[in-house]
Image: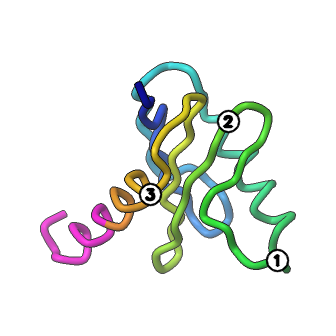
Amino acid sequence: MAGAASALFLLDIKGQVLVWRDFRGDVSSVQAERFFTKLLEKEGDPQDPVAYDNGVTYMFIQHNNVYLMTASRQNCNAASILLFLHRVVDVSDTGIC
């Protein structure tokens, strides 16, 4: 059985956590800092929306000046997670939120 995302983070352009929700309790806010450090290391390279570091898989998109990122320690479907992140952006663009 495939796992799900462990946490959802919204980060500003400087890597500060704006909002986060822990769903499974197996990652912490420290993962957001590690993600952003890894993102800065890849700055010159083409952006891959999936990154892996020390047992945690990060899946992210950038919308305007906000990074929407999920972190997971389990095997999960990256395509469905990325689709979810894009749908979160779609909802926020409709003006409902």
Q: Mark 2 points at which residue?
A: 56
Element carrying mark 2: strand
Whole-Å distance between the Cαs marked 3 and 2? Answer: 17 Å
Apparent side of residue 36 relative to residue 91 in the rendered image (left or right)? right
Query: What scheme was used to colour the molecule?
Result: rainbow
User: Given this view, does label 1 or label 3 mark the residue nearer the observer?
Assistant: 3
Magenta stretch holds residue 89:
yes
Inspect the image, locate mark 1, and give the three-letter code of the amino acid beneath it. Asp
- Which one is in front, 13 or 75? 75
CA gap between label 1 and label 2 equals 21 Å
Q: Which residue is the site of mark 1?
A: 45
Instruction: Name the quarter where the N terminus is drawn.
Output: top left
Q: What residue type is labelled 3?
A: Ala
Please give the range of residues in magenta. Answer: 87-97
Q: Which residue is label 3 attached to?
A: 79
Q: Which of 83 and 31 is in front in this view?
A: 83
Q: Could you say where residue 21 lies in the image, as x and y percent from the top left? A: 41, 36
Residue 19's disc number: none
| Residue 73 coordinates in the image, percent (x, y) | 60, 29
Q: Residue at 32% of width from left, 69% of height from top?
A: 89
Q: Which tag, 3 or 2, sits closer to the chain's start? A: 2
